[in-house]
Image (cartoon, grey):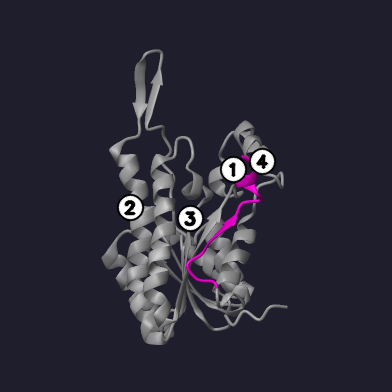
Amino acid sequence: MIETGLSERVVIVTGAAAGIGRATARRFAAEGARVAGWDLSPESADSLLGEISEAGGEGHYSAVDVSDAAAVEHAVAEVVAKWGGVHVLINNAGILRDAQLVKYKDGAVVSTLSDEAFDAVIRVNLRGVFVCTRAVVPEMIRGGGGVVLSASSVVGLYGNFGQTNYAATKAGVINMTRSWARELGRFNIRVNAVAPGFVATEILQSMPEKVLQGMVQHTPLRRMGTPEELAETYLWLASDAASYVHGATLSVDGGLVVGT
């Protein structure tokens, strides 16, 4: 069994109310970590904290808009006041607002990707990662080191139809990760990104069955991933077992790129 070294470590998970974020909060709690879950919905607090406690960890919940610098700094201060520092940040929060750049049919423009949809995804998926990391890093430096892990996507590596905004943010996350790896390694802060393929979360489950089957057919393992499999990836990257992994983007996609 791998010794993770995460017992009593302080871990912040953004987008912790559902899907990959919730599974990740539970998994770190099972290692005895102290888990601060951030999300927009305060009504998720009790159930999430109950799962963290049941898994064996200590929990804290804050309703946080990750794009709001003042709110994020306040939430970081709460975590530090409660537990004395931050050891791991998992930038998991993200949204979708899919649309073609220009949808053209029968000789006319039917629709376009709106400014609102573009800006909303940039604000959460890219600015949110920047704001949270900027707020947490000084605490990690003062504490002698830490780990920053951020959610990218295979879409960030290869693009995708109808996802101009989402693909741009996920590519941005990869290159912020590479830049921060150069800047922060000297402080013993490891920085990596994870690039999931199709994962069976609430967002995908709302899609038509035909679309879901198409995703599966483009994945050589012939299935979607699970939130728990992504949680295991975050756990390994945060653990002592990955102590020399730095500046990397790890694809967790069932071979999706090979199959396209």
Local secondary structure at mark 3 = loop
Q: Image height check: is 211 above or below 148? A: above
Q: CA distance from mark 2 to mark 1?
A: 24 Å
Q: Which residue bears the numbered disc 4?
A: 216
Could one spot residue 192 in this view of the protein?
A: yes
Q: Earlier in the sequence, mark 3 or mark 4?
A: 3
Residue at horizontal 41 percent and vertical 34 percent from the top: 99
Q: Count neighbours of disc 2 (C-alpha within 10 A) and say few if under 14, some if 14 to 19, many if 20 or more.
A: many
Q: In the drawing, what numbered circle is on residue 152? A: 3
Residue 79, percent across and down? 40, 77
Provide the residue designation for mark 2: 123
Labels 1 and 3: the sequence-earlier one:
3
- Where does label 1 land, which residue? 205
Give x and y (percent) for residue 56: 62, 77
* Numbered disc 1: secondary structure: helix
Q: Which amino acid, by three-letter code, is at mark 1? A: Gln
The residue segment tinted magenta is 245-260
Residue lying furthest front in this view? 182
**Does 181 appear in magenta?**
no
In primary-sequence order, the first of circles 2 and 4 is: 2
CA gap between label 3 and label 2 equals 15 Å
Q: Nearer the viewer, residue 177 or 150?
A: 177
Label 1 vs label 4: CA separation? 13 Å
